[in-house]
Amino acid sequence: MKSIGTHTIVNEQNGNLAFKIISFTDNSHFDYFQRNNFHTLVLITEGNGELKTDFGTFPIEKNSFFAFAPYQPFMVNGKNCEGIALQFHSDFFCIHQHQTEVTCNGVLFNNVHQLPVFKVDDAVFISFQEIFVKIAGEIDNGSLAQYEMLVSYLKIILITTSRVKMENLPSNLSSENNNAALLQKLKELIEENFKFEHFSEFYSSQLFTTPKGLATLLKKHYSRTFTQLMSERLLIEAKRELYLTNKSVKEIAVELGYNDEHYFSRFFKKNTGITTQQYRETVGFGKKVC
């Protein structure tokens, strides 16, 4: 695909990025760990390599698509990687507020039970390339109802990729029914107990397996350790509370099973690179536009 360059909309209230599309011909834009205060969507159009997160490493190639929420670290180690990235701040489009419309939260974003990378087919790939060109043109030339037009394009991308990812899920485990059942049960157990039980011993006992057996299963299917999986789930909930509520950090810590507020704050900063207060100020509760 011909390069479309870089096109950006800036939030006039604070000077920060609101919406941006960029085409890249190498991985120099993503060759270090990103910790952005906005959402990032990436479509790989040529080349191959690896997507690295703080919780695992995953192969990427042409037609690969991946999405990351604010302050979720990632980087690309690629060979002749080319692609298009779309980035938007929650001030521009709030996925929490529009969840019933796009259903991407818990599918593209904030899902610890699925791999972050998946492939789109050629038809979707081509349609996305056409949409990206339209987005670039709208940013440069749009006037009346520009925001509505850009959001409509963004919704198409979010809805389409959410559908593709959901459709591809069963194939990962179709030949291993026992493992599929175990992982589904683990997912249910985590959702029911992650605020109170943080260690693998509890979950392995509930699944009638050993911590080592559970670790092997998670490594094979999720490319994560149990500690990584649990940390991700706790961070998602912590971010949600910081984003949507005015609860104190101490209240959030206690609700997530941390009696020591300072230990919880260190855990959050270690995994996000910023403090709970910085997250709330740059992404979450109290924003005028969402």
Image: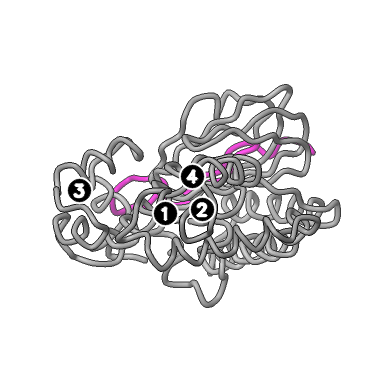
Q: Residue at x 55, y 28 (%)?
A: 29
Check disc 1: other Cα within 10 Å, few if <14, some if 14-19, many if 20+: some
Which stretch appears magenta?
A: 1-23
Q: Residue furthest bottom?
A: 100
Instruction: Of the two numbered discs 3 and 4 on the same chain, state the one appearing first in sequence.
Output: 4
Q: Is residue 62 above or below residue 177?
A: above
**Residue 277 marker:** 3
**Residue 76 marker:** none
Q: Residue furthest right?
A: 122
Instruction: Of the two numbered discs 3 and 2 on the same chain, state the one appearing first in sequence.
Output: 2
Instruction: Of the two numbered discs 4 and 2 on the same chain, state the one appearing first in sequence.
Output: 2
Image quarter where the C terminus lies is bottom left
Q: CA distance from mark 3 to mark 1?
A: 19 Å
Q: Are marks 1 and 2 in contact (CB under 8 Å)?
A: yes
Instruction: Of the two numbered discs 1 and 2 on the same chain, state the one appearing first in sequence.
Output: 2
Q: Residue 32 at x, y = what percent?
A: 49, 25
